[in-house]
Amino acid sequence: MRIYRGFHHTLTTETALTVGNFDGCHRGHKVLLERLRAVAQAEHWCAAVMTFEPHPREFFLPATAPARLTPLREKLAYFAAAGVDAVFVIPFNPRFAALSAETFIHAILVKALRVRHLIIGDDFRFGADRRGDISALETAARGAGFTVEATPTVVFPASGERISSSAIRAALAAGDCAKAAAFLGHPYAVAGRVVHGRRLGQQLGFPTANLYLRHAPLPLTGVFAIAAECEGRHFTGVANVGLRPTVEAGVIRPLLEAHLFDFNGDLYGRQLSVRFIRKLRDEQKFSGLEALRQQIVLDVRQAHAACAQPGV
């Protein structure tokens, strides 16, 4: 899979293209990418994706932008696994945000990317002030030699609810890991580099691996039963995501602390992936370290039971 930063590379092959943020890489995205790949293979075109970094809402409203579900590195791995041939990672900056809908269509889609078929969501908007829509694309397509396909909303069969990144964030915020996993097609997970902490967990008898979270905050907080992976080794455990109110004051950046069962070793500097299996409780402030330790004993017991369920 080829990765391009920006749209300054004029392609030599015609493309079937889809455009979106793909935050979460959920079941709805899977349907869209399967359709993209089928069209590209049938016509011998390049199957291409355009995505943005940062997320447009992080650019326009950084203080209120939603928590990310999927970092760019994981999105790219997802695209590669889906059989995408090329990905255009577009820096979402003032220059790009100011492009008119007409310039986006003719200079980027037609001239630079040689689009022959465009697959988009039914709510797709583009161009300065979001003035471009499906109707504008269809009008332009008739004169520019490409076709436009709007994918229908993908719903979850059991409930009829629309599968979306927003719905997944809401499920995670409510502590419903099972619903989030059903919409995603896999348990929600985060990955990060293990960094040094205060070693307080070790003092309490429950040493933790502390993850550096590049994109904070996460869409969930609290104490969770988890499954984890590091360099091919698999673990179960319990993790806290939050501000550690019992031992810290004035902390504004959440931390993920994971206690891995049946593990003694050094993970500093390594990448650890954590999958969230079940929420056990909200984060809370205790009267002191002994009260915190007693609660951790209960958390570990509950996490063992949750991780013993089939499929974990």
Image: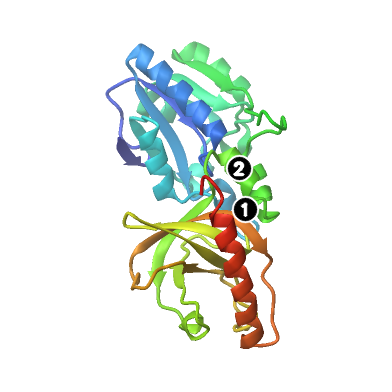
Can the viewer see residue 30?
yes
Q: Amino acid at mark 1?
A: Pro
Vertical comparison of 133 with 5: above or below: above
Q: Quadrant of residue 116?
A: top left
Near-viewer residue (286 or 260): 260
Secondary structure beneath disc 1? loop
**Mark 2, other Cα within 10 Å: few <14 / some 14–19 / many ≥20:** many
Vertical comparison of 87 with 289: above or below: above
Q: Quadrant of residue 183?
A: top right
Q: Is 230 left or right of 310, judged from the image as shown?
A: left
Q: Is 133 left or right of 195, judged from the image as shown?
A: right
Return the x and y of residue 189 as percentages of the image width and height: 50, 52
Vertical comparison of 112 with 284: above or below: above
Residue at the far left in the pictured view: 12
Near-viewer residue (274 or 83): 274
Return the x and y of residue 93 as percentages of the image width and height: 48, 49
Q: Residue at x 33, y 65 (%)?
A: 270
Name the image colouring: rainbow
Near-viewer residue (224 or 100): 224
Count of numbered tags: 2
**Residue of label 2:** 165
C-alpha span from label 1 to label 2:
10 Å
Say which of marks 1 and 2 sits in front. 2
Q: Amino acid at mark 2?
A: Ser
**Residue of label 1:** 66
Badge 1 vs badge 2, beta-carbon distance below 8 Å: yes
Q: Residue at x 47, y 21 (%)?
A: 35
Among the two numbered marks 1 and 2 on one chain, the one whose residue lies closer to the N terminus: 1
Which disc, if any, is residue 159? none
